[in-house]
Image (tube, rainbow, N blue to C red):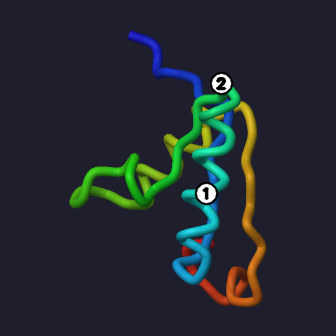
């Protein structure tokens, strides 16, 4: 079975979690499919693998570039 292709994956730091969720709601309200780790990634498992799959299976990547974004190992 082929993986579901989403329109967007939203990448963010924890400092802008609320903004990422708001962006996702607006996009979903306009008919797009969106992945945001806050509520689309179940707890546990390999976080790096989940990020890889989410980015690979999304048509676009939205980066919420905050002051602390580049300081994170994960982002």
- Up the image or down, 5 lies above or below 62; here it is above
Nearest to N terminus: mark 1 or mark 2: 1
Q: Residues within 10 Å of mark 1 (few under 14, many from 20)?
A: few
Question: Hey, which quadrant is residue 73 in on the image?
Answer: bottom right
Front residue of 68 and 29:
29
Question: Hey, which quadrant is residue 71 in on the image?
Answer: bottom right
Q: Which residue is mark 2?
A: 31
Query: In the rendering, at what x and y percent does residue 20 appear?
Result: 61, 61
Residue at the (46%, 21%) spot, across then down: 3
Task: Please give left or right for residue 62 compared with residue 35 in the image.
Answer: right
Question: Hey, which quadrant is residue 15 in on the image?
Answer: bottom right
Q: Which residue is mark 1?
A: 22
Q: Quadrant of the C terminus?
A: bottom right
Q: Secondary structure at mark 1?
A: helix
Residue at the (55%, 58%) spot, across then down: 21
Q: Residue furthest top?
A: 1
Front residue of 14 and 46:
14
């Amino acid at each position: 079975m082929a993986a579901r292709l989403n329109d967007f994956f939203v990448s963010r730091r924890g400092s802008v979690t609320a903004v990422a969720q708001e962006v996702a709601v607006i996009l979903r309200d306009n008919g797009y499919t969106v992945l945001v780790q806050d509520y689309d990634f179940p707890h546990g498992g390999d976080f790096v693998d989940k990020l890889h799959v989410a980015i690979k299976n999304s048509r676009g990547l939205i980066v919420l570039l905050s002051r602390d974004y580049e300081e994170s190992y994960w982002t």
